[in-house]
């Protein structure tokens, strides 16, 4: 597979930003991704939420089916990534208050 250019990646991000509802996201992501890829992304997000709440790797693995290696990677990105997980965890918490 050819590596996409930064411009092509940004185009995808801009398209995603144009989605207006969960239903539109559901339709677009289901056409864009396989069911397995959607599940994997969902479980990584769940792991990030659980790590932020102090859950153990064993508990996260039991609830998500993710490997300890993937959980560690999510944990590393949560602490030293680009800040995306923290940003969205903060927004998610605010929207549920």
Image: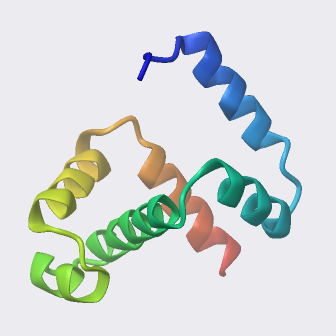
- In the rendered image, residue 8, in percent from the top left (x then y), is placed at 63, 17
- In the rendered image, residue 37, in percent from the top left (x then y), is placed at 46, 58
Which quadrant would the C terminus be assigned to in this image?
bottom right
- In the rendered image, residue 89, in percent from the top left (x then y), is placed at 49, 63
- In the rendered image, residue 15, in percent from the top left (x then y), is placed at 78, 35
Residue at 58%, 53% (x, y): give it.
33
User: Taking 82 as reference, is 86 above or below it?
Assistant: below
Residue at 64%, 70% (x, y): give it.
94
Res 34 → quadrant:
bottom right
Res 51 → quadrant:
bottom left
Please give left or right for residue 7 compared with residue 6 in the image. Answer: right
Query: How many numbered circles are shown?
Result: 0
Please give left or right for residue 78 compared with residue 55 in the image. Answer: right
Please give left or right for residue 23 compared with residue 48 in the image. Answer: right
Q: Tell which residue pokes out farthest to the right in this image.
A: 20
Q: Nearer the viewer, residue 31 or 44?
A: 31
Q: Nearer the viewer, residue 45 or 51?
A: 45
Q: Tell which residue pokes out farthest to the front in this image.
A: 1
**What colour scheme does the image use?**
rainbow
Residue at 22%, 57% (x, y): give it.
75
């Amino acid at each position: 597979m050819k590596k996409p250019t930064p411009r092509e990646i940004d185009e995808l991000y801009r398209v995603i930003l144009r989605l207006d509802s969960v239903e539109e996201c559901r339709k677009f992501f289901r056409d864009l991704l396989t069911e397995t890829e959607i599940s994997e992304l969902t479980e990584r997000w769940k792991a990030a939420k659980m790590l932020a709440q102090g859950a153990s790797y064993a508990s996260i693995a039991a609830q998500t089916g993710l490997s300890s290696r993937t959980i560690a990677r999510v944990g590393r990105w949560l602490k030293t990534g680009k800040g995306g997980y923290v940003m969205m965890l903060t927004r998610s918490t605010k929207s549920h208050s």
